[in-house]
Image (tube, grey):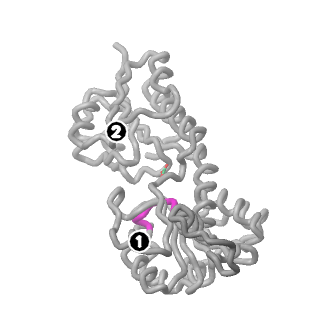
């Protein structure tokens, strides 16, 4: 009998067709919002393979109901939405989508940095409100990247791609990472430093750590308060890596220059205090949101499902 694959959302590209052509029965949840936990359990309980979104929480309660499941392919590089240890105990392979989204996420991060340093969103709003009455020497003065120190927190693939791109703006790179990054050291002349040193010395801080038990609130009141008054921080990784409440305090009191958010601590809920601030740029978690990348992510997820259900090794396993 054909093995069943459940996809928790319509995904870019034609992976449902691809999986059918490989002999699987495919069903796709077509709701406009992320599938609810109950619905996920109901729809996925018989499936051998499941493709999930980062907005689907796959905890013990869900995993206990997936009696046929052999593989969960997360349509994301981050997989903090899945209890991977418990999945492993149940014999379920979990996979993610590394590599294919690094360029898109780096491009978005650079956009977020420039939106903060050049006040792009504020300026655009000003235009739409009909407030532009002519060129003035002090209209929307921002800060230049040239000569500034950029601190990359988490120098994996995405952090490395951000470092490569930001270097072209004539910046200096420092980075915080468990291991030495030879591309940043050799090609970009960047230096590995402690997190405290980075927080204290960087003009722009860019966060690229995965969310794990070790990185939860790794950026917190004790190191945020080391930041320069002129510095900005951007996060296109996971909200919970930063103690958001304290960052908001600093922004409110103008103890730092600004911040760019693509992710939030209680996503999709947003702290209402953030919406009142002028010195922030707020995006709805769109780091990897390009057509090209999302199609590649979908294909990689589908190929992971196919591999496991055909008894082969997963391409990008995480547990
Ligand atoms: C996006 O946040 C991802 O983890 O792919």
Q: Quadrant of residue 181?
A: bottom right
Compute the Cα span from label 1 to label 2.
Answer: 31 Å
Few, some or many C-alpha atoms within 10 Å of disc 2 (few <14, some 14-19, many ≥20)? Answer: few
Task: Out of 253 and 82, give the one closest to the viewer.
Answer: 253
Write down the residue under mark 2. 32
Question: As drawn, is 15 to the left or to the right of 53?
Answer: right
Highlighted range, magenta? 235-241
Task: List x then y, in percent, for residue 238.
Answer: 45, 60
Mark 1 residue element: loop
Identity of the residue drawn at 56% across and 75% down: 232
Few, some or many C-alpha atoms within 10 Å of disc 1 (few <14, some 14-19, many ≥20)? Answer: some
Write down the residue under mark 1. 217
Mark 2 residue element: loop
Contact between labelled residues 2 and 1, with CB atoms less than 8 Å apart: no
Identity of the residue drawn at 37% across and 15% down: 2
Task: List x then y, in percent, for residue 250.
Answer: 44, 82
Question: As drawn, is 100 to the left or to the right of 279?
Answer: right
1 vs 2, front mark: 2
Total number of numbered discs in the rendering: 2
Q: Quadrant of residue 47?
A: top left
Task: List x then y, in percent, for residue 15.
Answer: 49, 27
Tell me the quadrant of the picture where the N terminus can be found.
top left
């Amino acid at each position: 009998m054909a093995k069943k694959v459940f996809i928790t959302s319509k995904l870019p590209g034609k992976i449902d067709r691809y999986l059918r052509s490989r002999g699987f029965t495919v069903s796709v949840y077509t709701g406009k919002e992320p599938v609810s936990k109950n619905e996920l359990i109901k729809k996925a309980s018989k499936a051998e393979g499941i493709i999930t979104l980062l907005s689907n929480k796959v905890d013990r309660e869900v995993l206990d109901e997936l009696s046929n499941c052999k593989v969960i392919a997360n349509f994301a590089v981050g997989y903090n939405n899945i209890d991977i240890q418990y999945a492993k105990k149940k014999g379920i392979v979990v996979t993610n989508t590394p590599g294919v989204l690094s360029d898109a996420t780096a491009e978005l991060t650079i956009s977020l940095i420039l939106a903060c340093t050049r006040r792009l969103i504020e300026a655009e709003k000003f235009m739409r409100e009909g407030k532009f009455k002519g060129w003035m020497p002090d209209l929307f003065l921002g800060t230049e990247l040239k000569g500034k120190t950029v601190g990359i927190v988490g120098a994996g693939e995405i952090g490395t791609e951000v470092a490569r791109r930001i270097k072209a703006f004539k910046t200096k790179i420092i980075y915080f990472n468990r291991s030495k990054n030879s591309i940043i050291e050799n090609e970009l002349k960047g230096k590995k430093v402690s997190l405290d040193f980075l927080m204290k010395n960087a003009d722009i801080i860019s966060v690229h750590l995965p969310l794990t038990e070790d990185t939860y609130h790794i950026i917190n009141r004790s190191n945020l308060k080391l930041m320069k008054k002129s510095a900005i921080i951007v996060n296109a990784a996971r909200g919970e890596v930063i103690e958001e409440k304290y960052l908001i305090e600093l922004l409110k009191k103008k103890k730092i220059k600004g911040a760019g958010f693509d992710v939030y601590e209680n996503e999709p809920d947003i702290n209402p205090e953030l919406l009142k601030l002028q010195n922030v740029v707020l995006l709805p978690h769109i780091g990897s949101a390009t057509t090209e990348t999302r199609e590649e992510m979908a294909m990689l997820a589908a190929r992971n499902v196919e591999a496991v259900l055909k008894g082969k090794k997963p391409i990008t396993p995480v547990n």
